Image (cartoon, rainbow, N blue to C red):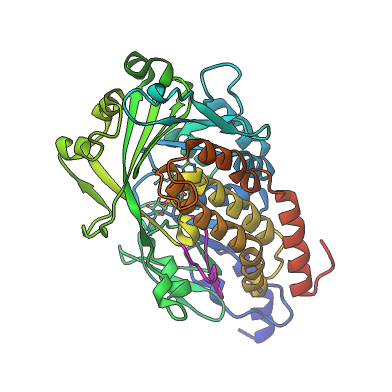
Amino acid sequence: MSSSWLELLFPFLRSLWRPGQKADQSPPLAAEARPFTIAIIGAGIGGLTLANGCLKNKVPFVLYEAAEEFGTVGAGVGLGPNAIKALELIDPTLRDKYNAISSGNLTPGKENVMFDNVYAEEGFGAKRGWKPAPYGAPCYDRTSAHRKDLLDILTAAIPKENVKFNKRVRSMKQGEYGVTIVFEDGEIAEASAVVGSDGVKGPTRGYVLGDKYPGEVDATYSGKYVYRAIAPMKDALEILGEHAGDAKAFCGHKITFITFPISSGTQYNLVAFKHSDTPWTHPQWTKLVTREEMTADFDGQVDQRLVKILDWAEPRQWSLHHHMNTPIYYNNLICLLGDSAHATTPHQASGAGQCIEDALVLSHVLGRVGDAKHLPLAFQVYDAVRRPRAQKVVRTSQEAGEMYAWLHPDMGDDMVKITENFNKRYLWIWEHDLINDLRVAESKLARLTGAKRM
Ligand SMILES: Cc1cc2nc3c(=O)[nH]c(=O)nc-3n(C[C@H](O)[C@H](O)[C@H](O)COP(=O)(O)OP(=O)(O)OC[C@H]3O[C@@H](n4cnc5c(N)ncnc54)[C@H](O)[C@@H]3O)c2cc1C
């Protein structure tokens, strides 16, 4: 076949190319803008939201997930106004669906209260004359959802053919024109670029940071673990009375109980934090203990009515690890998103929100890339816009955890000061101008690629 025949045939063959095949890494013909496909690794909140963003921005993608189906278990998750706005900017129907599945406080008038601060001790501070002290803001609507419900709304629009289950990434290798991905089952796929939304322990982080920053690949133990329970609200109300219906933070020395309604107020979500001075040495990140060991963690510090709710908890310690430092979110054609980039402790209820913001910005930028050769520039722009903010969330969350557990040097057990601080500390997260982020990202990309402002 003559070379002119080949030239005629090449665009046609490319149009037949399907994800997982090899064509994507072929070198471009001269002056031809190279189309691209993104491999998204991991179908958690981050990867699924990115997939929704890619659909909206017409970015071709394949989502690879290690599990055999979309996530079906989990506890409650609360989204701040920034996260809800990010959902809306990706697709207004996602915001509407989230509103339909999420729950607020049960008491009218408490719509803007994130939590009431309460003493965890016997009597919840009544003997000190303490009244539950609210914090929140007019911009903030208290909402939380069952994680499964949130995953369900994120998966609804994703075409089946874009998702490959039972695909656990074993290794990746970058070439000049793409990334080769090898899975545990031996299958090999190729993509123009990879976005690793594979969580705090996922392998992608090693491919982004391993060479230059090997000390930053592994997450570090944040000094605390949690027990998690979901109880029927009717039982919680029977046990805790007025203390159950609304979101509350029960504080004490080295412990915090965070509680809030989910599932349209029919369920009561509880996360019990225990700070410890000893390193986490168990080979797994979760550890099954006895029921007695679990309740002993809170002996003498927590009202027994609250401990009773732990009857609905599996006695499993979930260690909390985070990425306090991530010097960069990409390495040429491989990029991090969500917890793989910036796993955080949950004290500001913002980890999932940051995943969603990542997905908004990255899908927006990718949607404006016209040639595969510009993918590293797109990742550079995403890194510049997202990393400073997301890493600040990680740092300030650790500090918030110290406050809740009376370990902060400037606050100690001063609940008035702590509540005052909480009334202000979330505003920079909640009131952030995401539309400006998109504008900045667009103009940075245009500058880097030499394109006219889009
Ligand atoms: C106790 C607790 C409470 C929290 N509460 C809140 C809250 O109220 N609000 C909030 O905003 N955030 C909260 N968070 C944080 C939030 O849950 C996380 O930030 C978010 O779920 C992370 O999503 P992700 O998609 O990045 O990662 P993950 O949810 O971890 O998803 C990663 C996916 O990648 C897949 N995967 C991993 N390795 C591979 C591989 N090798 N190959 C293929 N696939 C792979 C996994 O199977 C998984 O599906 C909380 C966290 C905790 C621990």
- Residue 306 falls in which quadrant of the image? top left
Q: Position of residue 256 (x, y in %)?
A: 37, 39
Tell me if residue 301 comes above or below residue 389 in the rendering: above
356 left or right of 300? Answer: right
Q: 451 and 131: which one is in front?
A: 131
**337 magenta-colored:** yes
| Nearest the eye: 229 or 11 | 229
- Residue 200: give x, y in percent of width and height: 40, 58
Name the residue furthest bottom: 2
Asked if residue 49 can be seen in this view, the reply is yes
Name the residue at 81% across, 70% down: 451
Snapshot quadrant of residue 309:
top left
Q: Residue furthest right?
A: 452
Q: What percent of the width, then of the height, locates residue 7?
A: 68, 79
Q: Quadrant of the N terminus?
A: bottom right
Question: Total number of numbered labels?
Answer: 0
Residue 40, given in percent of the width and then of the height, sits at: 50, 58
435 left or right, relative to 160: right
Is residue 279 highlighted in magenta? no
Dominant secondary-structure state across the stretch colored magenta? loop
Picture quarter with the C terminus: bottom right
Judge by depth and name the residue closer to the eye, 7 or 72: 72
Q: Provide the residue span drawn in magenta.
A: 324-338
